[in-house]
Amino acid sequence: MTSSTWDRGTYALWHGTVPTSTILDESGPEDLWVRGEGSWLIDAAGRRALDARAGVGNMTLGYGRDDVVEAMSRQARELPYVCMVRWELPAPVVVELAGALTDIAPAGLDRVRFTHTGGAAVESAIQMARGYHRNTGKRDKRLVVGLRDSYHGSPLAAMAASGQRMMHWRFGPMPEGFHHIPEPTDDTGAELAAQLDEVGPERIAALVLEPVKGRNGQPLPDAYLRAARAYCTEHDILLILDEAFTGFGRMGEMFAAGISGISPDIMCLAKGITAGYSALGAVLATDRIYQAFDSATTVFAHASTTDGHPVACAAALATIRAFAAEDLVPRGRVLGRLLGDRLEDLLKGTPVLGGIRVVGAYVGIDLLDREGHPISMRDRRHLEAACRRQGLLVHYTPDTVMLMPPLTMTTEEAEFAAETFASVVTALGPGFGS
């Protein structure tokens, strides 16, 4: 591509959540990413940028991993596809991956169903929870409880489980059978039981939680998660942990459930499961749940023809092996601390710095405008664009700006990320809120 502008009459792609016209106004064909090397992306003009957002947290191993690519290529040559929706048998790689996941999962998660995305995994988990209670004679337990302002994906049931009113307003009406309680206001977990008692535990099929909130990197308090585990056990409520974002080393443990030491009844995975090299999700469940469906008179008819795609499963197996061989979880913790410490040092005394939060290899940076309020989405977008111009890719949400590097990023690259980010923030600081 040599043109510096798009031909809008022939441009067929409809982009994601940002209006496509905005993308076309602000970029051209030379801005397309065309290659990745380690922690770096290269665009069509040959410019390099350090990907300190790891895609959007997916690319835990970085780009150009021969081990993952070769595993996928080998599987594609041998057997690229099988369908497991009805009677068909899986490819061996699918069975092997299921076993590998149960080996590293929190205790008790001994069964695996595959999906193609994290949102689909949450959707499947919700239907699994309701089906479990129906199959065990508790048909009134249909309600799914989540937290306000939580996010669990874009399929309709996952969206309904999410506690974001804007999503419900834009895409509603939402299906019935969902309820949202406030986020915890203290570290004790004492308020949770009263909130669930008020809802009525006899009506609740499942409680779905992110152990660390992906939008800002704020962990749920250990005591809160332990209280949730105890309450769910006492009242036969299934505890679902949505680890589509927090799993695979991002939060300093292989799975964020390990931070508080609890085991859920159901855990949802995606993103890092293949290190971003393919689309794959998974739902891990206890044997007790599995047995409620494993009979001639029950069926769990919630599946897609691409679930457990062999090529994606080959990528996931290669990823799990890389985590073990390269000791990536503790490496991620070291990387996060390095970034956080350097940013604290570089931005110390800067009036725009509201705080830095480090959880594993997730670094959330809260920035303030001249009035002392969190910077606007417009300011965050300008900051992201300014970082890209300096060869650094960062991510932001309505809550914070974040660095989520590949766990394979080098010390030198992390130093570059911290220094570049700090220089951009310092330069833009007086302009925040203007």
Image (cartoon, rainbow, N blue to C red):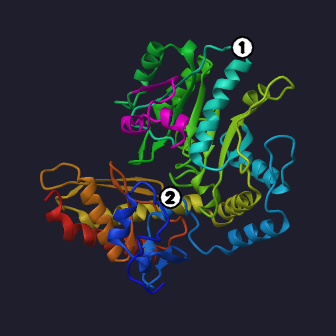
Q: Residue at x 86, y 46 (%)?
A: 88
Q: Residue at x 67, y 30 (%)?
A: 128
Instruction: Check disc 2 and give the amino acid type.
Output: Gly
Q: Residue at x 64, y 27 (%)?
A: 129
Q: Position of residue 400 (x, y in %)?
A: 33, 52
Label 2, residues with CA under 10 Å away: few <14, some 14-19, many ≥20: many
Q: Nearer the viewer, mark 1 or mark 2?
A: 1
Which residue range is magenta in the image? 154-181
Disc number placed over residue 57 in the picture, else none: 2
Residue 333 shows up from this direction: no
Residue 316 shows up from this direction: yes
User: In the rendered view, would you say 415 is above or below 354?
Assistant: below
Residue on which the image places disc 1: 137
Check if residue 430 falls in the magenta segment: no
Q: Position of residue 431 (x, y in %)?
A: 15, 64
Give the distance between the C-alpha atoms of the residues marked 1 and 2, in whole angstroms: 40 Å
